[in-house]
Amino acid sequence: MRADLALIGFGHVGRRFARLLEERRDWLALDYELDCRVIGIATAHNGCIFRAQGIDAVAAADRQGSDALDADAAAPADSFGVIRRLAGSDSPLKIVVETTTLDIAAGQPAIDHVRAALESGCHVVTANKGPAAFAYEELSALAADRGVSFLFEGAVMDGVPIFNLVRETLPAVDILGFRGVINSTTNHILSAIEDGESFDGALARMQADGIAEADPSLDVDGWDAAAKTAALANVLMRARMTPQAVDREGIEQTTARLAMAAKGRGARVRLVASAKRTAGGVATSVRPIELPESDLLAGLRGVANALILQTDVLGEIAMTQLAGGLTQTAYALLSDLVTVGRRHRQARSGAAPDRSR
C-alpha cells in the first residue's frame, strides 16, 4: 500500500526521520505492507518542495545550505501549500509528518499545520509537544470527525511508547496521576553537579555536546517539562490545560547548592513533573524535588528519563529510558506511521479502528 508523506519541518528530527524511513524501507514493506515515499518537504529557512513522483529525502537531508531542497519555481509558497498539494495526492494514505520547533507561547505554527492537515483528510504524526499540550481535545475530535489519525508518540520521552502503552494495552484502566523526570538537559546538569561540576560548567558542557540548545531557557526554566506535562495530562487524564497552567519552577544556581546538600544527606534532587486528579480537576507541577536515594527517579543520571503512571487497577507502572536522542524521536514517528497503516487496513476490512485516548 502506497503512503505519500509531506515532511513539515526538516531540522535534525525531520532529517533523521528521512534517513530512518529509508533504513527501514524493506522492513515496512515486508512486515506492514507500506510503500512510503516523501513527496513534499517544507523548511523554516530553505523554502519548500513538492514532487508528485517522489523526492529523494535522504539526499535532501545530506545536503547543507540554501540549496538543501533543490527547489524550483513551481514549489509551494509555504508549508500550508505543501499540505494542500499532499491532500490532492491519489495515494490511499496521505500523511503529514510535523516536526517544527516548539512554540511555548501558543503551540504555533504546529497547531495550524495539524489542523490544516486533518481538515484536508490527511493523517498526522508529530514529535511536536505543542498540539497535544495546547489543543489536544480540538484536534483529536477533528481527526475523529474526518476519519484520520492524529498521533504524537515522539512528543514525550522520544521513542518510549507512553501514549501507545495506555491506548493499546491498558483498556478500562484509569490514569489517576503520574510523576517523572522527563527533561534530559536538566537531569544531565543535576547529575553533573553531583559529580562536582558547577552549574554553569555543566550547562556549557551540555551545550557543547549538543544536548542543550544555545538558548537553554526552555529546558532550564522548566518550560519543556511543563509542555510535556500538559500533553500527558491532556491525553491520559483529559485535563484540558496548557503549559502555562502547570505550576512551574526550573533549576538555577541555588538548585545546585540544594543538590549538593541533598547528596550529603544520601538524597538526590531531580526536576520532577507530576499530575494528580483532585476534586477541582487535575493539578500539575514541574519543580526540583529532593528524593530519597531509594526512589526510582533519584537513580536517573545523565540523559535518562522515567515516567511513573499511577493507575486505579494496576497500581504504579514505570517506564524508563536510559538514553534518548534523534534516532529515538525519529523512531517514534516511524512507529506512529505504522499505526496509521494498521488502522487503514482495519478500516478497509470493516473493523473499526480504536482511536480511544
Image (cartoon, rainbow, N blue to C red):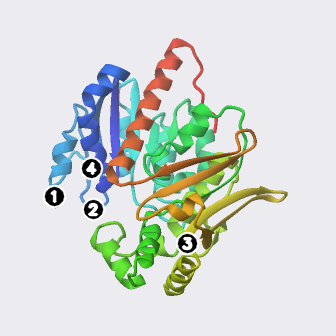
Q: Helix, strand or loop at disc 3? A: strand
Q: Is residue 197 visible?
A: yes
Circle 1 Cα neighbour tier, 10 Å, few/some/many (<14 / 14–19 / ≥20): few
Residue 269 image point, x, y percent: 56, 73
Q: Earlier in the sequence, mark 4 or mark 2?
A: 4
Q: Earlier in the sequence, mark 1 or mark 3?
A: 1
The quarter of the displayed image where residue 165 is located? top right
Circle 3 Cα neighbour tier, 10 Å, few/some/many (<14 / 14–19 / ≥20): many
Q: Earlier in the sequence, mark 1 or mark 4?
A: 4
Q: Earlier in the sequence, mark 1 or mark 2?
A: 2
Residue with the mark numbered 1: 64
User: Looking at the image, which is closer to me, 268 or 309?
Assistant: 268
In the figure, is residue 228 to the left or right of 323? right
Q: Helix, strand or loop at disc 4? A: helix
- Marks 4, 2: nearer the viewer: 4
Q: Earlier in the sequence, mark 2 or mark 3?
A: 2
- Marks 1, 3: nearer the viewer: 3
Residue with the mark numbered 2: 45
Q: Helix, strand or loop at disc 2? A: loop
- In the rendered structure, find residue 83 and report the number of the disc placed on it: none
The quarter of the displayed image where residue 47 is located? bottom left
Name the amino acid, label 1: Gln
In the figure, is residue 214 to the left or right of 54? right
Residue with the mark numbered 4: 15
Residue with the mark numbered 3: 268
**Residue at image point 27% right, 50% down:** 15
| Label 4 to label 2: alpha-carbon separation | 14 Å
The answer to whether residue 292 is above or below residue 14 is: below
